[in-house]
Amino acid sequence: MHGASRQFCVNSDRLKGEEMDLDNILSELEQDGIRNDKVQSDRTLKYLNITKDTGEFLRVLALATCSSKILEIGTSNGYSTLWLASSIPPDGTVTTIEYSDQKAKEALSNFERAGLVNKIALLQGDAQAVLKNFSGQYDFIFLDADRSKYMDMIEDISRLLKNGGLIVCDNASSHESELAEFMNYLKSQKNFITSLVPVGKGEFLAYKS
Ligand SMILES: C[S@@+](CC[C@H](N)C(=O)[O-])C[C@H]1O[C@@H](n2cnc3c(N)ncnc32)[C@H](O)[C@@H]1O
């Protein structure tokens, strides 16, 4: 790339401008999530958001990989989606899938408040079924849903990830045994290069070469 100018994938002034309002919404959701999940005994009503340092890590990864087409499985109220959507170019898209109707409604409201609704396609439904009808190629796939279903979705996830794309899977340390089969499968694939990163609840990265 000597002599050639590198095109920046995100206009940094725009990102800073977005972050002014976004920072407040992200801190509000971070606090709400902690408060709600402490008192809520029904697991389906917990938000189970990523940690703030995971959000920062996702942002760095999305920017460093110049990702503009991201797929997220497990939206909850949209906390992680906002980190991702604010880290892609203006014409980029995060497609995010959430099973719960109530959480999808809350996520949509948060996307509107953050002014990022135009960069997010929210689908309400079971990701396993939804992915079957998906085509195209994603730069980045973030997994944060029902861990017991990842092996059932692995063929579709691999098919939808471009060569040179990245899978990021949350809870790789906090729920290591539940994810062992999935992580071992990707580790055993010749076209995937993997790494377990001790950020937040443990992020398992799989790069498709
Ligand atoms: C850990 S939470 C996601 C948290 C979110 N990524 C964040 O950090 O803000 C997992 C979410 O995945 C959803 N979910 C679980 N299984 C799913 C499936 N098969 N399809 C779509 N969503 C699913 C749950 O309803 C829940 O809201």
Image: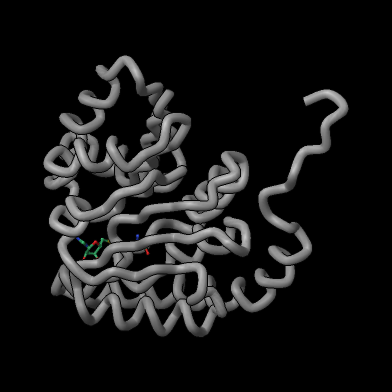
Relative vertical location of residue 45 with respect to residue 200 in this rendering, above or below? below
Rendered image quadrant of residue 196: top left
Q: Nearer the viewer, residue 12 or 170?
A: 12
**Image quarter (top left, top right, bottom left or bottom right) of the N terminus:** top right
Relative vertical location of residue 162 with respect to residue 125 in this rendering, above or below? above
Quadrant hosting ligand 1: bottom left
Q: In percent of the image, x 73 and y 66: which residue is there?
A: 14
Q: Position of residue 136 (x, y in %)?
A: 36, 47
Q: In percent of the image, x 19 and y 36: which residue is there?
A: 155
Q: In this rendering, would 115 be left or right of 29?
A: right
Relative vertical location of residue 92 with respect to residue 106 in this rendering, above or below? above
Q: Nearer the viewer, residue 198 or 11?
A: 11
Rendered image quadrant of residue 173: top left
Q: In this rendering, would 168 be left or right of 147?
A: right
User: Is there any visible trace of residue 1 in the rendered image?
Assistant: yes
**Image quarter (top left, top right, bottom left or bottom right) of the C terminus:** top left
Q: Position of residue 175 (x, y in %)?
A: 23, 42
Q: In percent of the image, x 44 and y 34: which residue is there?
A: 197
Q: In percent of the image, x 16 and y 68: which residue is there?
A: 43
